[in-house]
Image (tube, rainbow, N blue to C red):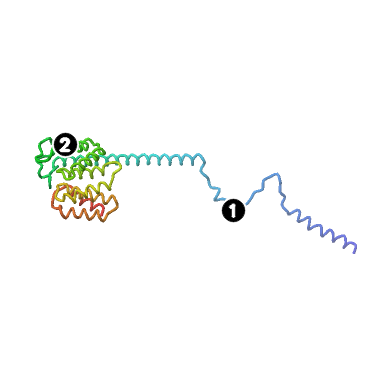
């Protein structure tokens, strides 16, 4: 029995020693290694260096700047072309007005263009001089002064021979002035059509009135007046008829 008591403590001590022998021993001075998971292996892929990213951003900015410069050049070129076309159009109307001024209605009494320097029959010289002064301002491209000149003419000669021409030019100049006055242009063209329905300026005034309505947002009125122009003068070779057809095709 005494031997059994001695052996039991020894048997209990041995498993503890075995356990201690099998337990791993770590060196606290060395960093522990962790198991690598699949997600960690994926995140360990190479990351672009900061300098590479900066270079890429710089190159993209340069490309955007170049594109902006190209677009700005295109816009400026188109703006110049638009101003040139507008001026050419006005110049053509000036030349046309020189040829047909006084060409219809009351103005049939005139024998020549007041801008030609020739005699104009029964038209008072005072009226001719007043119209010519305003018209010369148009030729000189002094549009604001020309509008004032035609206003002065119409106040002094509201029923004069060249009143229809003055009304037309007043409306035309309101469209090319800066800023343009659509209300005044509409008033001038409408007055011409009401007071002088047989004048040679009527087709041109109808076309311009249609454009004024369109620019003012009154598209129904615009289409109505342009279709009326085609119905009344569609068989003529007037440029206003051609412009009206094209305008209707492009915008309606």
- Dot 1 surroundings within 10 Å: few (below 14), some, or many (20 or more)? few
Q: Position of residue 211 (x, y in %)?
A: 25, 49
In the rendered image, the vertical position of residue 121 relative to residue 193, given as above or below: above
> Total number of numbered labels?
2
In this view, the mark in front (2 or 1) = 2
Residue where numbered disc 2 is placed: 129
Q: Secondary structure at mark 1?
A: loop
Horizontal arrangement in the rendering, residue 187 relative to residue 39 (left or right): left
Asked if the residue under mark 1 is in contact with the one under mark 2, i.e. CB atoms within 8 Å, the reply is no
Q: Position of residue 108 (x, y in %)?
A: 10, 45
Q: Earlier in the sequence, mark 2 or mark 1?
A: 1
Residue drawn 43% across the image and 40% down it: 61
Residue where numbered disc 1 is placed: 37
In the rendered image, the vertical position of residue 178 relative to residue 203, given as above or below: above
Residue drawn 21% across the image and 54% down it: 225
Q: CA distance from mark 2 to mark 1?
A: 99 Å
Horizontal arrangement in the rendering, residue 74 relative to residue 25 (left or right): left
């Amino acid at each position: 029995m005494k031997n059994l008591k001695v052996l039991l403590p020894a048997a209990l001590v041995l498993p503890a020693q075995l356990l201690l022998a099998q337990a791993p021993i770590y060196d606290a001075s060395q960093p522990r290694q962790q198991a690598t998971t699949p997600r960690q292996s994926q995140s360990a892929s190479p990351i672009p260096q900061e300098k590479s990213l900066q270079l890429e951003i710089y190159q993209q900015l340069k490309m955007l700047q170049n594109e902006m410069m190209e677009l700005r050049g295109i816009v400026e070129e188109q703006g110049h072309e638009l101003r040139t076309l507008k001026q050419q159009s006005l110049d053509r109307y000036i030349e046309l007005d020189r040829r047909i001024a006084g060409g219809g209605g009351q103005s049939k009494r005139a024998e020549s263009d007041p801008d030609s320097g020739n005699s104009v029959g029964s038209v008072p010289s005072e009226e001719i001089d007043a119209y010519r002064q305003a018209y010369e301002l148009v030729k000189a491209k002094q549009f604001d002064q020309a509008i004032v000149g035609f206003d002065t003419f119409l106040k002094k000669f509201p029923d004069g021979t060249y009143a229809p021409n003055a009304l037309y030019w007043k409306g035309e100049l309101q469209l090319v002035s800066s800023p343009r006055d659509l209300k005044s242009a509409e008033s001038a063209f409408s007055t011409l059509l009401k007071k002088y329905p047989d004048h040679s300026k009527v087709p041109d005034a109808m076309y311009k009135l249609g454009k004024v309505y369109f620019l003012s947002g009154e598209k129904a009125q615009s289409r109505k007046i342009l279709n009326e122009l085609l119905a009344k003068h569609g068989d003529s070779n007037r440029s206003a008829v051609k412009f009206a057809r094209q305008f209707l095709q492009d915008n309606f």
